[in-house]
Amino acid sequence: MAFLNRQQLLAKEDLEIRKVDLGKGDFVYVKQMTARERDTLEQTLLTKVVGKDGEATYEQNLKDFRSKLAVNTVCDEKGNLLLKPGDFETLANSISAARMERIINVAQELNKITDEDKDALVKNSGNDPAGASPSDSAKN
């Protein structure tokens, strides 16, 4: 184990890419996300709610979580994403739940996403987080 200096911390890290067997001879690759990609994904899982008093809060919205995670992690063998941000709805309506689970299990493992992480999103969001712009797209 070595101490990383500033230059080493800011150098582009090689992200892990894993081949995922989807059955019937088909496969995809799934990659680790960068910190920014994960932040962007997490923002899409929050919905801004403005109360009667005009104060903004955020509520967890896990609708299409699996397809949004897939859009942010399914890639080619070099780590280039295959899907576009707006593809999450089409993907959710097109792929079987069994195949999606194979992708998501690997994506969650590679990116250390747990059920507790999903629950913590709202707790950590606070009121009107700086720079947050939750949307229905998988990436901004």
Image: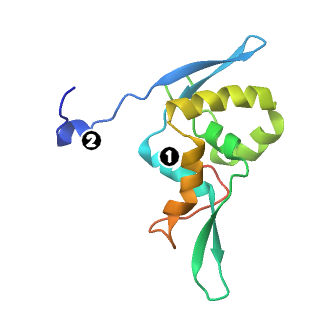
Dot 2, how many residues are within 10 Å of its Cα: few (below 14), some (14-19), or many (20+)?
few
Q: Tell me the CA gap for discs 2 and 1.
A: 17 Å
In the rendered image, the quadrant that contains the N terminus is: top left
Which residue is pictured at 68% across the width and 41% down the height?
A: 66
Task: Determine the residue located farthest toward the front in the rendered image.
Answer: 116
Residue 34 position in % (x across, y down): 44, 40
Asked if residue 105 can be seen in this view, the reply is yes
Q: Residue 93 sits in which quadrant?
A: top right
Q: Quadrant of the C terminus?
A: bottom right
Which residue position holds label 1?
38
Residue at x 50% of width, y 24% of height: 17
In the image, what residue type sits under mark 1?
Answer: Arg
Instruction: Identify residue for label 2.
Output: 10
* Residue 77 visible in the snapshot: no
> Toward which corner of the image does residue 102 lie, by quadrant?
top right
Instruction: Name the residue located 46 percent from the left edge and 66 percent from the top edge.
Output: 131
